[in-house]
Amino acid sequence: MTAEQSQSEPAGAVAGPDEPRAAPAALEQDFDGGSLYALRAAVAAHAAAAGLPPARVYDVVAAAHELAANAVRHGAGRGRLRLLAGSAELACQVSDDGPATPAGNGPPPSMPDAPWPSEHGHGLWLVGQVADQLTVSRSPAGTTTATATFTLTPAIAGVSGGPPGQDPTEDALPAAGDR
Amino acid sequence: MAAGASAQVTELGVDDHACLTFGEPEELLDLTAAFVRDGLAGGLRVVWLSDEAPQAGVAELARRGVAVGSAVAAGQLDASGCEGRLLSGQSFRADAAVAWVSRQAAAAREAGFAGLRVAVDMSWALRPVTGIEELPRFEEDLAAALDGAAASVLCQYDRGRFDPVTLASVAGFHTRSVAAATYHADAVLRICRQYAPPGIRIAGEIDYQAEEPLALALAEAVRLDGDVVMNLEALMFADARCTAMIADAARTIAGSRVVRLRCAPGVAAGLDRLGVAGVPRVTVVTAGDR
């Protein structure tokens, strides 16, 4: 698994290593906090149509949700999700125009006295766990784009973790925390 | 916080005439199992009248931890259909039905039981049964018949199938109204107490937006006595935050008691990723891929 962060590269202008070249957008959907359920349903349908087995479909949905929720809670409050289906991989790309907050800075945004507080930044950790690659980039204009890539290769599909031979404990934490 | 419930099913007394409203079969079976379990434990004879296959119902009770085998063998538990008991030839007469309950109460006392508990699935009243207009009178007369008879009756009404007017017309004749303690319920998510076995049940999809009711439900689950079952079989999605909250609660309970998490595969994988399955006294049971 690889977790990269390139804060200075423009996102979207040029296809980066995280974006399948010339891949058609299987899904392009705007979201906000009230439409995450619909977003998950749409992602699930398209991930299944791309040929992923049920366990991997769940991983893609989980990754899409965490990236979108991150944009809702710590970014602009809304954003756009694109699902890019290449021949060998499926990329889930979430962008928003919100302010970037360094990972771990400040208190959790809600439930400061919750009986069961959960670790801040856990969402991106999860994406790093389930995706084969996670990149986060930020354009000069302030648009943040997070891309989780899932390989469609049968030998790797269905395995949560990195490519064969890589220690799954390496890079377990993403370079990018919650913004 | 037991929203919408004036009593918990576990609080019913010896001569209560309680009105249970339920929204889904799982809720009905859970509350019925708790009603039966507590009745058997109290030395009462327990009768469950339901038109759904009685034997399947008994198997459901067993699955929820009720010791049905010995109770049926000892004549302490009987699960039957309504015909020949509350109904005769698919016709209903309030006085005959009340008399049947009274006879059952007397027979239970003569057999040496401390009293009688009857759970009645009222779904029969949705069918074209003659005399159905006597239903309110049945509920009214039953309340009088139960007074001092060491017999309690739990009338079970499906909220989604009985019209509000009927529910309102019979509600007043009951000494108690009972429903599952519900922490959150909307079209996407339901979080409620589970009574048999004790724990909580979460169904649908959950994310950080429901962390407040989830925190409340988990905190109450931690405070339950004995072992705890978290029924997550119908939870089709849990985000990272909620999965971590569930895992934290399981770890806390497992400090002194056994926790069983029954999960759909996706949620089970999320808990596994957090190392929950390796915690002593925690069992994660995954339902088969659907």
Image (cartoon, rainbow, N blue to C red):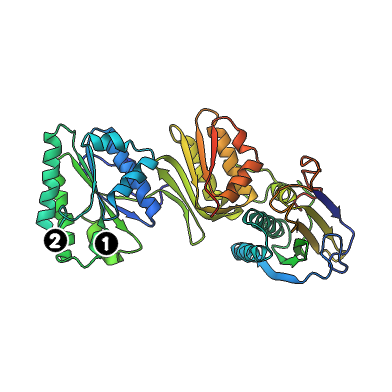
Q: Farthest residue in the front direction?
A: A155
Q: CA distance from mark 1 to mark 2?
A: 28 Å
The x and y percentages for residue B82 are 20, 54
Indicate the chain on which mark 2 is placed: B
Occupied quadrant, residue A10: bottom right
The disc, 1 or 2, on the residue closer to the chain's N-terminal end is 2
Which residue lies under the disc numbered 1?
B168
Give the crowd class for mark 2: few <14, some 14-19, many >=20 residues within 10 Å.
few
Three-letter code for the amino acid on which mark 1 is drawn: Ala
Tally of marks? 2
Instruction: Kindly indicate the quadrant of the structure image that contains residue B86.
Output: bottom left
**Residue indicated by mark 2:** B89
Tell me the crowding category of disc 1: few under 14, some 14 to 19, or many 20 or more residues within 10 angstroms, Cα based: few
| Chain letter of disc 1 in the image | B
Spot occupied by residue A103 in the image (x, y as percentages of width and height): 78, 48
Looking at the rendered structure, the secondary structure element under dot 1 is: helix
